Amino acid sequence: MSLERPLRRDGLFARDLADETMLYDADGGTVHVLNATGQVIWRLCDGEHDVDAMVSELRAVFRVDDGVEVETDVLDVLAVL
């Protein structure tokens, strides 16, 4: 996954479950469960949003103060995805 403008890769199937999203990796046979933060990041992995846009969206959705580090969390989730 490119970090410039992350794009979901083929072979991952997503299912929303209330405040979580379950991802199934058909190639690796693994399952990942994303919390609300992960859901937002996953939704923004559309090839249109860069990391800065994801950080801005998370700050807005979760009302995160400017002094709180968010980019590291985004990059950690992207590394897993």
Image (cartoon, rainbow, N blue to C red):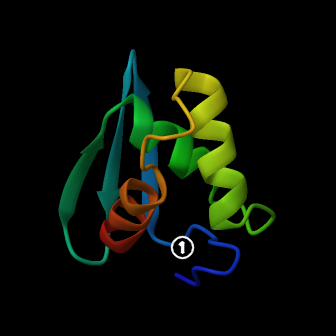
Residue type indicated by callout 1: Asp
For the point 42% across and 36% down, the residue is 37
Quick check: 75 left or right of 61?
left
For the point 54% across and 73% down, the residue is 10
The number of numbered discs placed on residues in the rendered structure image is: 1
Label 1 belongs to which residue? 10
Q: x, y percentage for residue 78?
A: 43, 67
Query: Which residue reaches farthest top?
Result: 18
Quick check: 54 left or right of 74?
right
Quick check: 7 left or right of 13?
right
Above/below status of 31 relative to 81: above
Looking at the rendering, which quadrant does residue 38 occupy?
top left
Q: x, y percentage for residue 23?
A: 35, 50
Query: Which quarter of the rendered picture does the C terminus lie within?
Result: bottom left
Q: x, y percentage for residue 25?
A: 31, 65
Q: Badge 1: how crowded within 10 Å, few (<14), some, or many (20+)? A: few
